[in-house]
Amino acid sequence: MNKGLLIVVSGPSGCGKGTVLAEILKNDNIFYSVSATTRAPRPGEVDGVNYHFLTKEKFEELIGNDGMLEYAEYCGNYYGTPRKPVEDMLTEGKHVILEIEVQGAMKIMEKCPDAVFVFILPPSLKELRRRLNKRGTETEDVIEKRLSEAAGEIKQAYKYNYTVVNGELSEAVDDLKAIIRAEELSAKNYPNYIDEVLENA
Amino acid sequence: MNKGLLIVVSGPSGCGKGTVLAEILKNDNIFYSVSATTRAPRPGEVDGVNYHFLTKEKFEELIGNDGMLEYAEYCGNYYGTPRKPVEDMLTEGKHVILEIEVQGAMKIMEKCPDAVFVFILPPSLKELRRRLNKRGTETEDVIEKRLSEAAGEIKQAYKYNYTVVNGELSEAVDDLKAIIRAEELSAKNYPNYIDEVLENA
């Protein structure tokens, strides 16, 4: 049985990452890695779906046992990626999508250099500004802050294996599908395809 | 302007490489690298289409000027890949397909480590035998020799970036298309996509 691919996806707020991933996750063999957090669930949030909600003690125990692929503290709460569910899915041959910001992705790059790193780009910073304005949920100040953060993140896109520009949604989805298909054909990921051809003589 | 991709394709005789490539070459931006040879044209062969037919002196001059990406001598004639037409097409942003046997591909790997190396596999050696028998053009002895050569080549498929199994033609074609699309999205090949997003603020 071949292991699945760990696909790490980053991209600035407003780039449409979530919409692209929702399309990709329609594939029966691609699963989403649910993060863990110590913050309290908000109304409507479901344990194991939105987050794995853990106590601080449990989270720190996992950190101590190298049970987190990455984690960070934010506003007094922990957020992180539990290692075991990801590794179990990969072992079962499932592909796992890990949606994460740049700093977390860099930590994953150290621990899992074989993962596939994809950065979703907006067509331009100008278009990103337009999209954030269109949402209408944030003040001008917040939008400026978002844009400056986005520029900082996009500068790190060079470190990723692939960049996908989300201009037309269907094109971005096809791009990500092509990346996953190509990685499935990579001789480095699946050398046993070659063995199988030779064995059946 | 982005440079095109150099796509090096190998695969044993009978794997259906030519049929897969004929489909891929329908894309207006993908071109086939025509080999050069010193052997005489056969009836119907056209200079610049089947081969670039060169004199021995011209071929050796090109070898001397590092004008051949790779070459080999076979039955007293030279065969090789002229460097200039390939580099010109790449500079113009065109993708170039170089169909070549394993030894030539290994030479290209040294000179052009950024090229994309794809090995087309038959579904199995058993199926390859069936296809060679079906052709009916070769004796049993020749088929056995081909199969033993094929097994030797397939063992080197590990050195390629990608392997594509040609079981269903349409699937193999889609695989190769996905590989080309993914390589177009590789941050290593086209880092300026990232610059463009940042510049348009």
Image (tube, coloured by chain):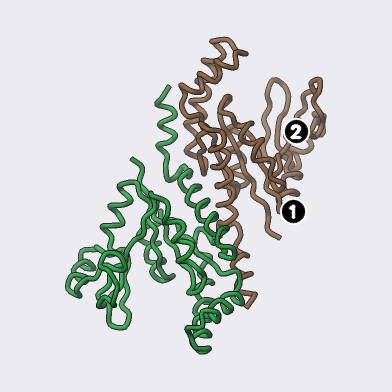
Chain colours: A green, B brown
Hey, what amino acid is under mark 1? Glu
Q: 10 Å neighbourhood of mark 1: few (<14), some, or many (≥20)? A: few
Kindly tell me whether residue A60 is visible in this rendering.
yes
Tell me which corner region of the image, top left, top right, bottom left or bottom right, holds residue B187.
Answer: bottom right
Q: Chain of mark 2?
A: B
Hey, what amino acid is under mark 2? Ala
Give the residue pinned by disc 1: B92
Residue in the image at 67% along x and 48% along y: B95
In the image, residue A100 sits, relative to residue B146, either above or below, namely below
Q: How many marks?
A: 2
Q: Is residue A101 left or right of residue B26?
A: left
* Quarter of the image that includes the N terminus of chain A: top left
Residue in the image at 59% along x and 67% along y: B194
Give the residue pinned by disc 2: B36
Q: Position of residue B156 (x, y in %)?
A: 49, 34
As measured in the structure, the alpha-carbon distance from the residue carrying label 2 to the one carrying label 1 is 21 Å
Residue in the image at 50% along x and 88% along y: A139
Residue in the image at 48% along x and 23% along y: B127
Kindly tell me whether residue B188 is visible in this rendering.
no
Which residue is situated farthest in the front direction here?
A44
Judged from the image, the secondary structure of the residue bearing numbered disc 1 is loop
Judged from the image, the secondary structure of the residue bearing numbered disc 2 is strand
Tell me which corner region of the image, top left, top right, bottom left or bottom right, holds residue A75.
Answer: bottom left
Q: Position of residue B126 (x, y in %)?
A: 46, 21
* Quarter of the image that includes the C terminus of chain A: top left
Tell me which corner region of the image, top left, top right, bottom left or bottom right, holds residue A25.
Answer: bottom left
